[in-house]
């Protein structure tokens, strides 16, 4: 229930360092009952030039009956990566925004024993729209390719 405050609390994103190794930061919500952390678990993020790498650490609960990472988990990671990229590489305003379009091509099975990375780049950012593309990777192995559009909303 909205108590009159903003519908999204920017302070919920907690990019504190995860030990400082290789530029990784935590990308976890302070409220761990929300989808990002409750479902996908702890995530780390870092900037790599003009790209953003969002990493999750698969667990058994993220697998399908074939013992691969479930496609819905990959899609969830990709969706969160769009907003992480806006924050880390783009304008920095990952606040009240919505995914308008997400196109994904699954090209390989995700191995639940290895971290899964969504590596995204901004194709174009305007005042209200963000156009992105990227790949979900495990090392050099491509699990999925994607492109997406995010619409930035005005704060209420």
Image: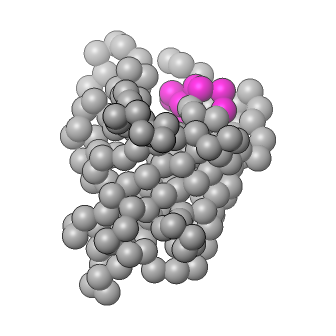
Render colour scheme: one colour
Where does the image place residue 58, in percent across and percent down from the top left? 31, 63
Please name the residue shown 30% across and 47% down the image: 42
Q: In which quarter of the image is residue 51?
A: top right
Please name the residue shown 31% across and 54% down the image: 40
Please name the residue shown 78% across and 41% down the image: 124
Establish if 131 lies above or below 117.
above
User: Principal SS element in the magenta part?
Assistant: loop
Residue 151 appears in the rendering: no
Task: Specify whether residue 17 is painted magenta.
Answer: no
Q: Quadrant of residue 129?
A: top right
Please name the residue shown 40% across and 44% down the image: 44
Q: Which span is picked out in magenta?
A: 90-97
Residue 75 appears in the rendering: yes
From the viewer's side, name the closer residue of 34 and 43.
43
Q: Residue furthest bottom?
A: 66
Answer left or right for 102 relative to 43.
right
From the viewer's side, name the closer residue of 47 and 104.
47
Where does the image place residue 118, in percent across and percent down from the top left? 52, 56
Where does the image place residue 31, in percent across and percent down from the top left? 25, 32
């Amino acid at each position: 229930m909205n108590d009159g405050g903003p519908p999204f609390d920017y302070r919920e994103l907690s990019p504190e360092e995860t030990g400082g190794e290789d530029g990784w930061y935590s990308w976890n919500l302070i409220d761990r009952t929300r989808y990002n952390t409750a479902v996908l678990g702890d995530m780390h993020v870092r900037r790599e030039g003009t790209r953003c790498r969002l990493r999750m650490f698969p667990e058994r609960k993220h697998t399908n009956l074939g013992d691969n990472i479930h496609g819905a988990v990959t899609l969830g990671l990709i969706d969160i990566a769009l907003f992480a990229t806006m924050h880390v590489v783009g304008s920095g305003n990952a606040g009240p925004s919505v995914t308008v379009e997400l196109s994904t091509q699954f090209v390989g099975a995700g191995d639940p024993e290895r971290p899964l990375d969504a590596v995204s780049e901004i194709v174009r950012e305007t005042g209200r729209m963000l156009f992105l593309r990227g790949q979900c990777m495990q090392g050099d192995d491509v699990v999925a390719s994607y492109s997406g559009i995010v619409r930035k909303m005005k704060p209420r």
